[in-house]
Image (spheres, grey):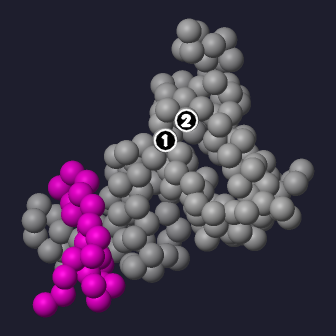
Amino acid sequence: MAEVKESANHGEWTIEILDTDQVVVKKNGEMCEKAMPELRAIAEAFNYEYDPEWNTQFFGRSMIDIINMKEAMALKIDGRMKVSQLKRNFKCIYNATLRVYDGRKTADDNATLSELRAEGCTGGDMTCKPEDTVEYFEFFLKNLYGIHVEVATIDDWVLVLDGMPLGRIKEIGKNATKKKMEEMLK
């Protein structure tokens, strides 16, 4: 019998990755006949933008990762991550828009962070925590990959102030002003 390698719970759902790499979704403890429709429902409950081209294994692993990261409000980043996944995960965890640049132009969503890595930068893994500031997050990505990023409000209305902790961005809301953010930081 197959063993569970990874799992995550969200509401009535449990997602499991078995040692055979099969993705199993249970709803209220009962195994679902098909995993894909349930994974889509879980993603929609999280307001998580997914690619309809994803296969069940990739989608299942992505949902386990995002559930665990959202619970801890900790964003895990590595060089294999595509720009689109970084932006999608950032939005889901911190409720903010992430702008990613390759030099002066917007980075290709299909490029991995390693592909964008500037000469002299080591690359590697990082985990952002809710207490990390926007300035720290931007600085760290610049030093690790040579990638310029900007953090904006969820509606991409205005850039978030450098001193704002990542975990508080969700409090900003839409049509925010710099003045409102300054008041939040007092």
Please name the amino acid that badge 2 sits on: Asp
Left or right of residue 141, residue 63 in this image: left
Q: Is residue 23 magenta?
A: yes
The label number, if any, that marks residue 132 in the structure image: 2
In the rendered image, the residue lying farthest to the left is 29
Q: Main secondary structure of the magenta part?
A: strand
Where is residue 80? Give x, y as percent: 61, 71
Q: Residue at x 39, y 78 (%)?
A: 56
Residue 145's image quarter? bottom right
Where is residue 148? Give x, y as percent: 78, 48
Quadrant where the image shows the C terminus: top right
Q: Is residue 18 magenta?
A: yes
Q: Is residue 138 above or below residue 167?
A: below
Residue 33's image quarter? bottom left
Q: Is residue 133 visible?
A: yes
The label number, if any, that marks residue 53 in the structure image: none
User: To which residue does mark 1 refer?
Assistant: 129
Tell me the distance, in whole angstroms, between the alpha carbons under discs 2 and 1. Answer: 5 Å
Q: Secondary structure at mark 2?
A: loop
Quadrant where the image shows the N terminus: bottom left
Where is residue 116? Give x, y as percent: 78, 65
Q: Are marks 2 and 1 in contact (CB under 8 Å)?
A: yes
Q: Is residue 183 above or below residue 146?
A: above
Q: Residue at x 17, y 55 (%)?
A: 12
